[in-house]
Amino acid sequence: MLREVADLGFSHVELSHGIRITLVPGILKAMDEGFIKVSSTHNFCPLPTGIVQAAPNLFEPSSSAPQEHDQWLRQTKRSLDFGQQVKARVLVLHLGSVKFGWFNPTGKLDAYFGKHPGVKLAEDERYVALRDKVMKKMQAKKAAYWNQVKASLEEIRPYAAERGIALGCENREDVAELPIDGEFEELLSGMTQPNTAGYWHDTGHAHIKEQLALLNHREHLEKNAARLIGFHLHDVNAAGKDHQPVGAGEIDFEMVSSFWKAHHLLTLEFGPRISVESVKESKLRIEALVAKRFPQA
């Protein structure tokens, strides 16, 4: 697996939340042979024993249920141990979600978007009224889940710091997932241990939220620029399908690249059906933007 990535011209890789335990010996062998390095891992990595498909939300830090919280803590520590073993700098995390029981009102926003292709939702009065109603319900429901997220992060950060790994708090595309995008600043500025966590920006997720008129992509990056530590880079088409090749969708990567700093990690994150040629072309597009952003490098 890693030899194939290296043969495409990549020097580093992010090990995802789809890494089965059976792949670990080959990964460690690749590390020993030195033909590729690990820049970051994504919780949970490797997957818990018996889980064979990607499961980043198998256990959520927003859950106050003792058994689920204990499993989240245990499996996150396991991911950090593995990250230290492969010399990763960052562990990317999902931060859980708000639970609504039988009926989740946030699904109405996706449904409206799907039924109104080509409509600018920010200018659609019916949609704006629906969005505001849904987000009011989200805000009213979130307190216990949000407080649990912050407590969970405070509980795990000393363990991550001991291993020299920063926690990358990722923005999400699902409306019910946490944080609500405007609250990253509150989350990261309120942490008691500095330089142990940061903002991980997923371009596709931000664009999907922009399509739903929940944020402005540029303004969101501006608000969180000081706390950025890395990026997942992939494109999104007009229908809201993400993990597309760079340049194949609607995202303004020139704008995104203006926020890059030399210490940021840049990870191409594609769907499994993307062709090898599209991966290579995306790599060249990003390298061109890097060269433009850092001409003296």
Image (cartoon, rainbow, N blue to C red):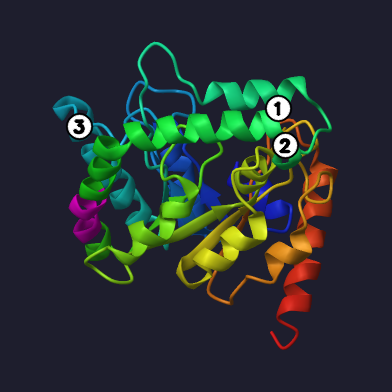
Discs 1, 2 touching: Cβ within 8 Å: yes
**In the rendered structure, which amino acid carries the disc numbered 2?**
Leu
Image side of residue 114 versus residue 44, left or right: right
Q: Position of residue 125 (x, y in %)?
A: 70, 34
To which quarter of the image does residue 163 belong?
A: bottom left
Amino acid at circle 3 = Ser
- Which residue does the numbered mark 3 point to in the structure image? 64
**Closest to the observer: 97 or 89?**
97
Q: Residue furthest top?
A: 102
Please name whichever residue, 127 or 157, is drawn nearer the observer in this view of the structure: 127
Q: Label 2, on which residue?
A: 121
Q: Is residue 212 left or right of residue 237?
A: left
Q: Outermost residue toward the left? A: 66
Instruction: Indicate yes or no whether the magenta region holds residue 46.
Output: no
Quadrant of image for the N terminus: top right
The stretch of residues the image draws in magenta is 153-159
The reply to whether residue 56 is visible in this rendering is no
Q: Residues within 10 Å of mark 1 (few under 14, many from 20)?
A: some
